[in-house]
Amino acid sequence: MTENDEKPPEFAEKIIEKYVSAQSNVFLIYGNTKDIYPVARDRYVPLVDFFVEALIKPDKPTAPRIVITYDPASGINFLNASDRRLIGREIGEDRMSRILSASRTDIITALEALREFTRININVPVKGTPGKTMRKDFAIIIKYGEAVAPAAKGEVILDSDRLRSLSWRIGFRIALSFHPPISCS
């Protein structure tokens, strides 16, 4: 493998650039989303894992994040089980279980829960600074976004309008979608 093989694909570089520069925090991904992408020499991962490692970086000490994925078929899932426990401690384990169960069958319930989760202040200790805490931000990845914000029948809807609509509904930091032909977040 050459050094160039380790670079992210061109589309990913553009997304990373826009995210890091704060030009955008919601992205629409469609096309060949089932492929694998390089994260290190001789190491390739699926698209969701690629964005978690290359962009979101949930364990970054200066900007820790809770990564939540939502798939209309499988519901809300947490990348890290300890993050699920942190939110469960805030809203109650019984309520968390009900929300996660309902998110598998009801998109609106899932979106409302995701919005509620992002409004919870989860503070974690700052490493190396006893007694100091920082807020743990959220990153939301939505798979099969066309099921969440479908194309309007009988008219054309721009991807930007669909993103705006979904952002208005849920209002998170980042959302990605992974299913052609039209994916949104």
Image: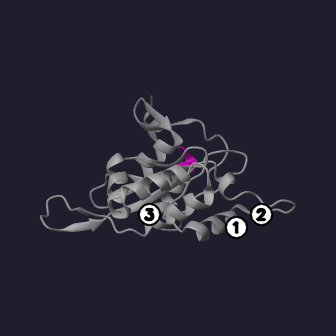
Q: Residue at x 70, y 67 (%)?
A: 161
Residue at numbered disc 3: 117
173 left or right of 144?
left
Q: Secondary structure at mark 1?
A: helix
Graded by Cα atoms within 10 Å as few (under 14), some (14 to 19) or many (20 or more), the crowding at tag 3 reads some
Amino acid type of the residue that numbered disc 3 sits on in the rendered structure:
Phe
Q: Residue at x 65, y 56 (%)?
A: 148
Which-is-in-front pick, marks 3 and 2? 3
- Give the mark nearest the N terminus, 3 or 2: 3
Amino acid type of the residue that numbered disc 2 sits on in the rendered structure:
Ile
Pointers 2 and 1 in contact (CB under 8 A)? yes
Check the image and tell me how it is coloured: one colour
Pointers 3 and 2 in contact (CB under 8 A)? no
Q: Is residue 132 above or below residue 110?
A: below
Q: Is residue 107 above or below residue 30?
A: below
Q: Residue at x 45, y 58 (%)?
A: 139
Pointers 1 and 3 in contact (CB under 8 A)? no
Q: Quadrant of residue 184?
A: bottom right
Q: Is residue 14 above or below residue 133?
A: above
Residue lying farthest to the front in this orientation: 94
| Residue 149: % across, % down | 68, 59
Residue at numbered disc 1: 161
Residue 8 marker: none
Question: CA separation, marks 1 and 3?
Answer: 25 Å
| Residue 18: % across, % down | 51, 62
Q: Bounds of the magenta span?
A: 8-12
Q: Main secondary structure of the magenta part?
A: helix
Amino acid type of the residue that numbered disc 1 sits on in the rendered structure:
Asp
| Residue 32: % across, % down | 65, 40
| Residue 146: % across, % down | 69, 53
Residue at numbered disc 2: 157
